[in-house]
Every structure is written in C-alpha cells, then in structure tokens.
Image (cartoon, rainbow, N blue to C red):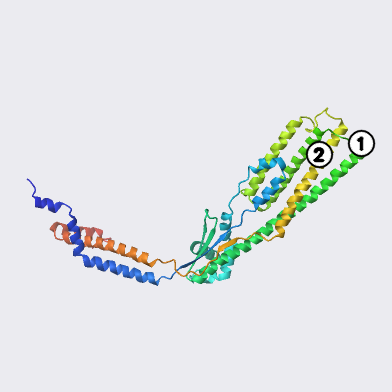
Amino acid sequence: MEQRPERQADDEINLLDYLIIILKRKWLILTGTVGIALLVGIVVFILPNKYVGTAQFLPPQDTSSTIATAMLSQLGGLSSIAGSALGLKSPNDMYVGLLNSRTVLDRIIDRFGLMKRYNKNWIFPFYREDARKKLIEDVLVVTNNDESGLVAVSIEDKDPKTAADMANAFLEELKLLCKGLAITEAAQRRLFYDEQLRDVKANLTKSEEDMRTFQEKTGVLQVDQQAQAVIQGDAAVRAQIAAKEVEIRVLKTFSTGQNPDLQRALESLRAMQAQLAKIEVKAGEGPDPLMPTGRMPSVGLQYVRNMRDLKFNETLYELLMKQYELAKMDEARDATVIQIVDKAVVPEKSEKPNRVLLIAAAMFAAFFLSVVAAFVLEFKEKALTYPGNRQRIELLRRYARLRKKE
C-alpha cells in the first residue's frame, strides 16, 4: 500500500519544527538565559580583583667561562685540546630555582607576614610549609624567556601595591642570596688552594735541596738538548695534570657531578693524560720512560730524575699560584649582582577575574541549556498525547524508585 505524501512529510525531520519549538518556548529560553547570566554576573562582581605585579631581571653572564679561559691559557698547546670540551650553560634555570628555594620563600613569608595573611582556616593548624605551597602554587610565577634571556617574576595578589612590593622583594632577596653564595664559593676555593700551595712549596723546597746536594756530590752534569726538552715537556704536562686534579677536587667541594665546570675540567684532564701518554710512548721503554736503559750512566739517570722532579714542582707551584690569585680576586670583589631591567610598579588594571568573558560564557551555556530544556518539555508534552506512552512512563517511574512500594 503506497504511503501518502502528507505522511512522508510528517515523518521527515524538518528544521521548521525545531524553529517552531524554540519560538514556542521563547520565554523559557529568554528567562533562563538572562536569569543565569544575571546570577553569574552577581557572583563575578562579588569576587575580589586579582592584580599582578611583574619585575624583570637579567641574570649575570656565566663568569666561569672567563675563569676557564684563563686556566686554559696556562696549558699552552693543550688549550686547543681541552677547549673542545667547553660548553657554557645558561644560568637562568639556576636563578629560577633559587627564586623557589626555601631560603628565599621563608624570607618573603616573614617579610610580609604571610603566615597570618594566608591562614584562612581556623580549625586546622597552618604550618610554614603550607604558606610556602600557597606562595609557589597560587601567588608566584617565574617565567624564563630563552630568546631574550630575561627572567620575569610575577606576583598575584588582591592588593595592587602588595603585588608590586612582593615582586621587587623577591629580586632583593635573590640578590642577597647570590651574594652570599658567591662569597662562600670563592672562600672555599682560596682556602683549598692555600693548603695545596703549602704542600707543593714543601715539595719544591725538597726538590731544590736534593738537586743542590746531588750537584755538590757529583758535579754539574749537562744533558743534550733533546733530553732536556723531553724532561721539561714531561714535567710540564705532569704538573698541568696535577693542577687540574686539584681544580677538580675544588669543584667537587661545592658542586655536583652535573656541574658544567666540573664536566669541562674532567674533559680537560682526560686530554692532558692522553698527551702525557704520547710523550712517554715517544720517549721509549725502560725503568724510566724518559731515559731508556743504556742511554746514560746511572749518575746521569739520577740527575735527569732530580731535574724532572724539580721542573714538575716548579711548574705545579706556578699553576696553583695563578689559580690561588684568581680565587683571591673573586673573594675580594663583590659578588656579581643581577641586573634589574624592570622594577614592578603598582598595577592599575586587575588581571582577574575577566568578568566580560565569564558572563559571555555563562550566557552561552545558559542559552544552550534552555534550548535543551525546551526540547525536553516539548518531547514530554507530545509523549503524553499518545495513550501507549502514558503506560510506559508509569513503568519507568515505578522501576526508577529505589525502594519497593509496600
């Protein structure tokens, strides 16, 4: 049996039907949208304003590159070998970590009385750790700009003046912390080199005495220029290795294994050890690699050994003295301070909440929910017009009950 065109048109989905439903329930949609928007607007305007104070600073250039270059210049021809290991790391990440350190956070907490200000819970105890967590998670934002090299410190607070003052206070506390750390590090290096210099000086004095005593007993022995060049080269490289080992021990006193300066020093040490191995291979084999058996009488061999020890201690003392002077200069001068590019000023405009955006989002959500409610009501109204649907709705209500009706 052929279906009539009118029945086909009734079964098809028609956009006009949707429009009719929307217009039919227009007052529901309008009142729902406006009502929810007004309610959200009232709540939004009750919320306190949040202001953001931002200060920017430029971290100091990595001074370790200058010190490393000065040390490498003492190595002569080996500087090109050790220089390949140099790779400087930006200090910005370190300063970001210092801003979040417990020392800086505690100073800010005490300075602005944040224990009392952030304690909104009068039932449970409020600890300093809770204040630090609040400060890091909700108040402090540190941004590292890799392109410009600047670090921004932003503080969010209900009071615009407090936001600016706290941002500037973070930079002040960071400068104080950096100054103390730099002085401590320089003092450690100076004291360590001072101890090493005393030991090397004692060895140098002993070598000089041994050489003088040997010459008085046997007379002055002259060696050929080739042997003398080998002795001086071997002693210089050995002294440079010993000086680099001292430098590595100094670095280990105040740094971890991931410290870039320590990594460069270890790479330089490996290069010098390889250079020493080449010198000893070229010299030959025997009891003393510098003077193979049969090349010189025993008296001459002892002279060569004494000369090598003397040259070694002289070169080592000279290298350590230069590093000691560098440490003294670092200790004497003030610590390199960060350069403040922009001090935080009192913000004139609040950053949060964005009331226009929140109200617009609320109106859109309210309109959508009102339209859905209109279609649900229309479906319910039409469903009740069919006799069979009434019985189904009653069954749904009965099965939806949690408790059985007695």
**Who's the residue at 25% across and 67% down the image?**
30
What SS does tag 2 mark? helix
Residue plotted at (62% across, 48% down): 260
Q: Mark 1 points at which residue?
A: 218
Which residue is at a point 13% across and 52% down the rendered structure image?
9
Q: What element carries label 1?
A: helix
- Of pointers 1 and 2, the one earlier in the residue sequence: 1
Distance, label 1 to label 2, CA atoms, is: 17 Å
Task: Name the one closer to the observer, 180 or 86.
Answer: 86
The N terminus lies in quadrant: top left
Horizontally, is 87 left or right of 369 in the view?
right
Percent of width and height locating residue 50: 45, 68
Residue 149 percent location from the top left of the image: 55, 55
Q: Residue furthest top?
A: 294
Residue 277 image position (x, y, % from top left): 71, 35
Which amino acid is tagged 2? Arg
Q: Relative to 245, is 98 above or below?
A: below
Label 1 Cα crowd, 10 Å radius (few <14 / some 14-19 / many 20+): few
Residue 308 numbered tag: 2
Task: Compare residues 103 and 207 and report the one nearer the observer.
Answer: 207
Place of residue 138 in the rendered image (x, y in percent of width and height, measured from the top left)? 48, 63
Image label count: 2
| Amino acid type of the residue tagged 1 in the rendering | Thr
Of the numbered discs in the image, which one, if any, rests on residue 101? none
| Residue occupying image coordinates x 35% and y 71% | 42
Camera-side residue of 222 and 12:
222
Residue 143 in the image: above or below residue 283: below
Q: Quadrant of the C terminus?
A: bottom left
Is there CB contact under 8 Å for labels 1 and 2? Answer: no
Q: In which quarter of the image is residue 383?
A: bottom left
